[in-house]
Amino acid sequence: MPLDLSRYLSLFVAEAGDHLDGFSRGLVALEQLVRDGAPPHQVKPQVDALFRHAHSVKGMSASMQLGGVAGLAHRAEDLVDLYRAEPSRVEAAGIDLLLAAGDALAELVDLASRGEPAEPDLALVVRLSDAVRRVKDGRDLATGELTVRSGAEPTVRADPPSPVRAERSAGTAGAESRHAPPGGAPLDSPSGAGPVVIEAEQPAETETATPYSTPTPTATPTPRPPTDPPAPRPPTPTPASTETPAPVPPPPAPDPAGLAGASPRRRVLVEVEVAAACPVPAVRAFLVVKKLGALGLVARTAPSVDELKAGRLPGRRLSVHLDTSEPLDRLTRALAQISDLGHVALREADEAPAPPVAPPAATSPTGAPPAEPSRTVRVRTEILDGFVDAVGELLLATARIREVGRALPEVHRPPLDEGVDRLHAIVKDLHDKVMAVRMTPLATVTERLPRAARDVARRLGRQVEVEIRGAEIELDRAILEELADPLLHVLRNAVDHGIEAPHLRLLAGKPATGHITVTARRDRDRVVLEIADDGKGMSAGRLREAAVARGALGAAQAAALTDKEALLLACLPGVSTAEQVTDVSGRGVGLDAVKRTVEAVGGTVELESAPGVGTRLVLRLPLTVAVQPVLLVGVGDEILGLPISKVHGAAHVAFASLDRSRGAPILPYDGELVPVHDLAALLGFPSDGRDDRAVVVAEGADGRIGLVVDALLGQQEAVLKPLGSPLSGVAGLSAVTVLGTGRPVFILDVPRLLAA
Amino acid sequence: MAKRVLIVDDAIFMRNMIKDIFAGSGFEVVGEAANGLEAVEKYKELKPDLTTMDIVMPFKSGIEATREIIKHDGRAVVVMCSALGQESLVMEAIEAGASDFIVKPFKSEDVLSVVKKVLGDA
């Protein structure tokens, strides 16, 4: 019964995506480690993790029958595997290639998620295969030049450029990549246009002095064709790292069948043929040897165990000389448990058996166990959002009950209030827990940053290092999702316009490599996120000029700004001091978008900079967006909400008595002159026209503004719900909430109010 | 009685797939593990008749887990489930005591035939 693969698609996409994210991040981290000359014990876990990611993606996509995806992942895995064997081979060109492969794989997975054909770019596959061959040959990836390394003699190959081994037909598909000859693009190589080299070496039949199952040095020199690459491991036999060497002959193991003496020990010749359908015949043959080894002493195999381990089983045929006292039918039964055996023949040989030496019991060194992994459950984000919505509704419903209770006669109210209080406490607790589930470490967005910075830096010929601190700090997932792109933009900006070219940095007395620090910390109910670079900084003066030139504000207004305020001019649309707005970024092209996004989630943006020293962007973000304190105001018959994060204060004024500048009323507030707007007029509501009204001073798009309202109704925790279509398109509105009375209240988007 | 199976793979979707293959074929999936550490723990707890074991996993590889399981219970039947291309790892797993192996991608009938054979039911 064929499996319905579509059932697994969404999990596949999610899990493969996680692996590919890890793959890209790991590559950048690896490059950094290698550049810093990190010791092997730091490099190895990183390469191992990369291998795991690539291998998992390959296995997953193969299981989803996405052959093209699996093929590309396979090439990436092969290259990583070479790095695993010899981390000193890691170089920028290889990392570039693997990053490109990771990106391509992510795209393919995305295509697959939409049910579209996912076939990799063949050029990329070929480049990876070439890279694998070059790394094996000891050639530098970037230049193609031969690099000589101690301990590994480079081999100059006279082979055709793109040989493909017909591994399946040669019965060597099991070749581990480092045993495979150079250019051994396995199986389904798309570079199959090249000449096919079929290995036709004779199987080496060797008498093994010890049973195969004693710890076998994996680096035992094996007969190799002359074209083989130098063995990546030292030629001196070392015990396989995973097994304990047996310095003394091991004690005889108990007879596996408890039949000691039941039958005289004699030599049995076992011949098996591995079924053609088996993709890895050498492994299958190895399993046969192992199985027989449990029933006697394997005296000789053809091909030898080393050949099998190198993936070679010519003709898919294996013969084993076994010294055993087991009856033939027991051997037959044991072999019957092994799949994929086409033909099995057993006969007693004439040769005398070797003196019995039982295989040693397998021992394993037990290292310190790694940390217990945390147990987690993957929950679809829609379900999580559903919880938040439901809890929000519960909060509102509770408030509604409380409101209705006010209408009850006094005698009935205490028990009801008690019940409602209890309900409210439970719902509040539930709300906190649900919000805690939504909290996601900042790492989910910051971990992409080093990679992105590296890409930009390489493209521009800069050197940059990104340091991330406080990535464990948690924020509402909804905020993080909004933040991902702006952060990326700010970072690219920092590399493109902040960090100078290496020679300029050296001239300025700074290290050639620029440093960008992304720091997060908790500050009461906010998260402060700083992105600081040690680049050339921004000039307040030039920003003033640029803003005036763009007509964003008058020369006098610009001059009146403090330097700190002037820097924020970079956030105005179209204001940039970049000599050239590159394809990467231009400060000002997009900083306005960053500011808008941050403010939309209830955050604020500050910019600090000193020419020659660097730039620091400070984002202050709320922990969560779903519940925000709002100031309720009355305008005519309407009630509206203003996010407290945007409100500076309020004052009662006689509207008519306000000074006017160019026809608009001006309110002196906190040492500033704040332009005042009538909210009713802005929104087109009728106003009662009283003269004694309240002014709320709030943060507008270009500084503070005063909003005239009819009444201040107090502050309230509001469960904000995003606006659905068509209201989501209305400028000046950001969300809606529902009061305890059941009355819906719109939350104003203050910065965009005036633009509306 | 239905043979009891423990499924070890770090990908949930692979576990689901393998689980679906066993479901309705006379097997009872009694547990799942997402890495080698969990695998050893669950094996000791559940004593399954059969364990399917991914090789490349975080925290502890399927090879190490197999070695520990075999050390704990010499009669354990562990079938490796590995993607094509790292055959040396499968060999290592066999050395560690695995009873058989299945190469990803696999068809459900192949999986069932391998495990039935290895359990001696074929």
Image (cartoon, coloured by chain):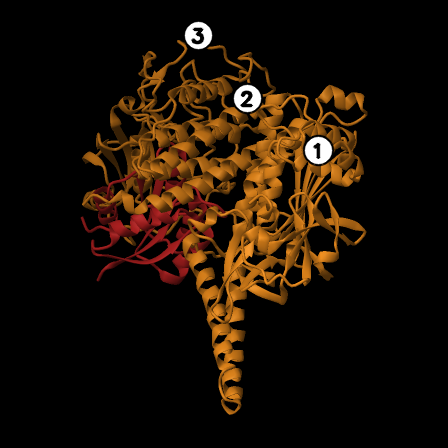
Instruction: Give x and y (percent) for residue A300.
Output: 33, 31
Amino acid type at image mark 1: His
* Residue underneath mark 3: A158
Please state which of the two labelled residues, at mark 3 or mark 1, is closer to the viewer: 1
- Name chain B's colour: red
Residue drawn at point x = 30 percent, y = 54 percent: A258
Amino acid type at image mark 3: Ala
Q: Quadrant of residue A582?
A: top right
Q: Chain of mark 1?
A: A
Horizontal placement of A742 versus A535: left or right? left
Q: Chain of mark 3?
A: A
Q: Which chain wears orange?
A: A
Observer-nearest of A575 and A712? A712
Task: Using a 10 Å C-alpha cutoff, classify the residue at mark 1 as few (fewer than 14 neighbours), some (14 to 19) or many (20 or more).
Answer: many
Instruction: Report if residue A536 is visible in the image.
Output: no
> Real-space Cα distance between discs 2 and 1?
22 Å
Instruction: Give x and y (percent) for residue A610.
Output: 79, 34
Q: Chain of mark 2?
A: A
Residue drawn at point x = 45 percent, y = 57 percent: A384
* Residue underneath mark 2: A93
Observer-nearest of A727 and A578? A727
Horizontal placement of A725 versus A439: left or right? left
> Real-space Cα distance between discs 2 and 3?
24 Å
Observer-nearest of A281 and A25? A25
Kindly state the secondary structure of the residue where label 3 is placed.
loop
Amino acid type at image mark 2: Ala
> Real-space Cα distance between discs 3 and 1?
46 Å
- In the rendered structure, which disc, 3 or 1, sits on the residue that comes first in sequence? 3
Please state which of the two labelled residues, at mark 2 or mark 3, is closer to the viewer: 2
